[in-house]
Amino acid sequence: MTRHRLRWLLIPAATTAALAWAGAYMAAHPYGDRFAVGIWPVPAGTPWSYQLLSGFIPALTAFSLVTLIAGAWHHVNCHQPKCLRIGKHKVSGTPWCGKHHLEARPELSAEELLAQILEELRSLREAG
């Protein structure tokens, strides 16, 4: 397996390990099950939504913002592997940085490629 694939296997493995640790901690704590569902300890008069509004929803918001930033960064950075520069040159709709944009461009321009295709078609027509 390549190093790149192993890195992507590490993310679910670390998440699974963290969830297993959290589950074991909640099971070992005397009030672990009550903390997990948000029913213990809350002062009298606290609305049922307090645990939801102070923990779960802000966590989802933070996760969403981090995901948004990562997606935006992937959208604008250079598409050369392991290059973290901002892609300022669009080659076939994909951003490339000033260092790598020449590597992403085809060796022939569109006009030269079209001329070669037309010449090939002419030779095929004359041969056939």
Image (cartoon, helix red, strand yellow):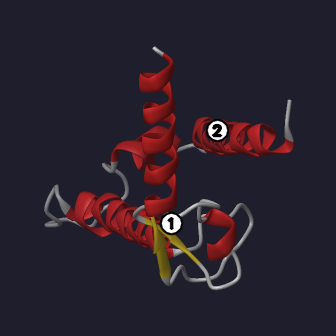
Q: Position of residue 94 (x, y in %)?
A: 46, 64
- Of residues 99 and 35, the one nearer the viewer is 99
CA gap, disc 2 to disc 1?
20 Å
Q: Mark 1 sits on what residue?
A: 74
Please tell me which residue is depicted at 56% across the width and 83% down the height of the picture. 86
**What crowding class fits label 1: few (fewer than 14 Cα within 10 Å), some (14-19), or many (20 or more)?**
some
Residue 82 vs residue 117, the one in the foreground: 117
Q: Residue at x 63, y 85 (%)?
A: 98
Q: Amino acid at mark 2?
A: Pro
Q: Percent position (x, y) of residue 122?
A: 43, 34
Q: Secondary structure under badge 2?
A: helix
50 displayed left or right of 39:
left
Q: Secondary structure at mark 1?
A: helix
Q: Is residue 23 above or below residue 69?
A: above
Kindly identify the residue that appears in the image at 28 percent across and 61 percent down: 57
Looking at the rendered structure, which numbered label has been put on residue 26? none
Q: Along the line of sight, which residue is nearer the eye, 23 or 113?
A: 113
Q: Which residue is mark 2?
A: 12
In the rendering, at what x and y percent does residue 97 appear? 61, 80
Q: Mark 2 or 1, which is nearer the eye? A: 1
Q: Quadrant of residue 19?
A: top right
